[in-house]
Image (tube, rainbow, N blue to C red):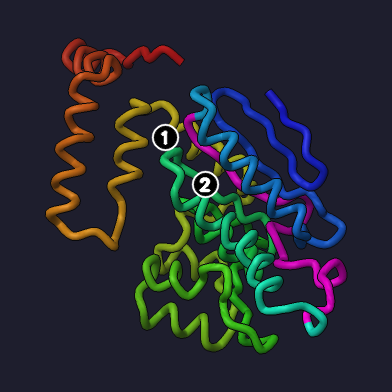
Amino acid sequence: MATNYDDVGYEVTDGIATITMDRPEVYNAFTGDTVLEVTDAVRTAEEDPDVYVMVLTGAGKGFCSGADTTAMPDWDDQSPAEYGAFLWTVQRVVATLRRAATPSVAAVNGPAIGAGCDFALACDLRVMGPDGLLREGFVNVGLVPGDGGAWLLPRLVGESKAREYLLTGRDITPVDAVDIGLAVEEADDPLAAARALAAEIRDKPAMAVQHTNRLVDPEQGFEDYCEKATRYQWDCVTDPEHHEAVAAFNEKRAPEYDR
């Protein structure tokens, strides 16, 4: 299944939704319309019962180079409320990815800069290509990470390492990303590797995957975790895929899920 957007490609194959930011002539720098389409594509995947994993990537040689400054208004002529409204549309990409129970994998095929970096960080997992890089970079142009970077990065790599990258604007190379646990792997073909990782996740019991993804929340206390885990575990105990998984294990065969 494919959905038509102007700036975004959306395709579902074998239970995996691939969302491609598609403005390769500007390394997938986004406009206001682009971010609205990305948000809609993520929501579409989340609401589709036939989608088990999402892959987010960019067309051509870039993942996403941030905002297309040639398409932005002159903010000196705008009000704080107008700027805030635009920034919220960018923040919504991050928020929608973070809220999704459907796991997401970023295939970072090229530069992911500024908000583009934050889109990659908002995914649950990342695969880096040899030309991929992550750069917050906001301080380099006199800005703060307005799209989530200073919230996301400390939770992923720790406060001290996050400050290093946030305050210097340094690149996070593929080797660095793997070394600090920010990426699963570096791969010559990051999209193929991301899809292979997505397929591995897709082939697990779907309810267990989504509930496990929901449980990963560094902000919650242990008591809240246990309360949620009890509810989620009951959902899984009564799920047919759990029974099939146990039967397959006992019978020493591969499980057969209704996909």
Q: Which mark is residue 105?
A: 2
Tell me where residue 64 appears, x and y as whole percent: 70, 60
Side of 36 where 23 appears, left or right: right
Is residue 74 part of the magenta span, yes or no? yes
Spatial separation of the CA atoms under disc 1 and disc 2: 10 Å
| Circle 1: residue type | Ile
Magenta stretch, residue numbers: 52-75
Side of 98 where 78 appears, left or right: right
Is residue 159 part of the magenta span, yes or no? no
Rendering quarter of residue 61: bottom right
Q: Which mark is residue 201?
A: 1
Q: Which mark is residue 86?
A: none
Quarter in which the N terminus is drawn: top right
Q: Residue at x 63, y 84 (%)?
A: 143
Tell me where residue 249 appears, x and y as whole percent: 21, 18
Q: Residue at x 19, y 50 (%)?
A: 225
Which secondary structure, mark 2? strand
User: Looking at the image, which is closer to me, 10 or 61?
Assistant: 10
Q: Residue at x 54, y 39 (%)?
A: 54
| Circle 2: residue type | Val
Callouts 1 and 2 close, C-beta under 8 Å: yes
User: Looking at the image, which is closer to me, 184 or 65?
Assistant: 65
Rendering quarter of residue 192: top right
